[in-house]
Image (cartoon, grey):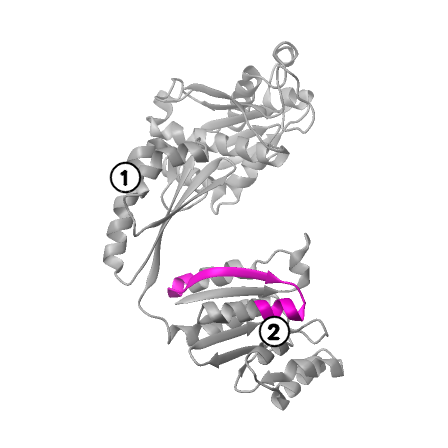
Amino acid sequence: MKAEIIAVGSELLTPDRTDTNSLYLTQELNRLGIEVVRKTIVGDDRQLLAEAFRDALNRVPLIISSGGLGPTEDDLTRETVAELLGRKLVRDDAIVRAIEARFRSFGRTMPEINVRQAMVPEGAEALDNPRGTAPGLWIEDGERMVALLPGPPRELKPMFREQILPRLERRVSNVRMFARELRVAGMGESHVEQIVAPIYKRYGEVTTTILAAPGEVQLHLRMWTADAEAAERTLGEASEALEMALGERIFTKKGEPLEEVVARLLTMNGATIAAAESCTGGLVAQRLTSVAGSSTYFLGGVVCYSNELKSAWADVPAEMIQTKGAVSAEVAAALAEGIRRRAGSTFGLGITGIAGPSGGTEEKPVGTVHIALASAGGIKERALRFPGDREMIRWQASQTALDMVRVHYLYGGAAKSAGKEPGRG
């Protein structure tokens, strides 16, 4: 089955609101084996709404919309859909009583305008909404199905789970979506594409999508089929071929973020880590501590922007900063070793750089970052130049720092940390 999602509301066409409902609905529909082929955001305009619903009705058997069910004049979804389907709107007194009771529970009287929310297209099923005043609507029109849901996520999500999901489960086929997600660090999108294109083109039944994100490239493999065994076999073969081609650059085959991979490695090895961060401003610490159980491996860290605090908190010699500069390989290494020694951790991470937009020079332009990983076996340092704005540079620096911990374990752990790993700069 194929479906379309229509998000209704002029506020979604401004920079102030994001349509998160469509992400949730897509995830839930995919789990049922329903493929979302289009998403549309439409403002509170009757003509544009009519066009969006009319076109969707001509393309797919299932439409799910969010928003536009409120009591005000600009809430036009129910009226628009009823008109398109040639159905009259009929007042449902049970809904009126439910809305009145909800207002009474707050010690208030229902405004007359809320009666609009009790107007139901003929033949539609009203969907109870105990979390708000706007009931949802389920409409069947021949082979077509339309679900009209309220916009607030706290109302939409439980209504979908409790009232839409059971209806769809009775109608879907055995076709399901099977997926794998590989994530790659330390390579650009075009480089990854050049390597993997000859591989994924061999698997015509697999839809492959390559997505670039700061510090990583994601490979999404998807199959729609009723044969679960064949899907797992095909996706497994494709994933193994991609893994052989990309090698150590793949940091996960489960779609998990890099901080979860590093957290698992540290936990498995009984290791701990601390961080001294300058340009990343505590981002590495934030990412590591976002994983449950982080107190077992993350001992702590410092954000030392000033030169004085680099010396006071991570024992970086003041004369080193003067002679080499705060953004240098030597200072990054000193930060890493200094925080490791102070915290008594297995690893120390040191990061210093120029995130911009100002502060760059011809010798050290914006995006210049030095990252060091210290352990009992020695110090590994990397000098990099990241593109992008301030936030992108900071994120890429944190990604590289975490990846240095992961790569450390690829080459035998502490015993090899002081040497140069194969294939690394």
In the figure, residue 98 lies in which quadrant? bottom right
Residue 126 in view in this figure:
yes
Residue 270 in view in this figure:
no
Q: Which mark is residue 164?
A: none
* Stretch in magenta: 30-51
Asked if residue 87 lies left or right of residue 3, the reply is right
The quadrant the C terminus occupies is top left
**10 Å neighbourhood of mark 2: few (<14), some, or many (≥20)?**
some
Q: Which mark is residue 131?
A: 2
Foreground residue among 149 and 102? 149
Indicate the secondary structure of the residue bearing disc 1: helix
Q: Residue furthest bottom?
A: 93
Front tag of 2 and 1: 1
**In percent of the image, x 27 and y 43: which residue is there?**
202
Q: Is residue 104 magenta?
A: no
Q: Is residue 36 magenta?
A: yes
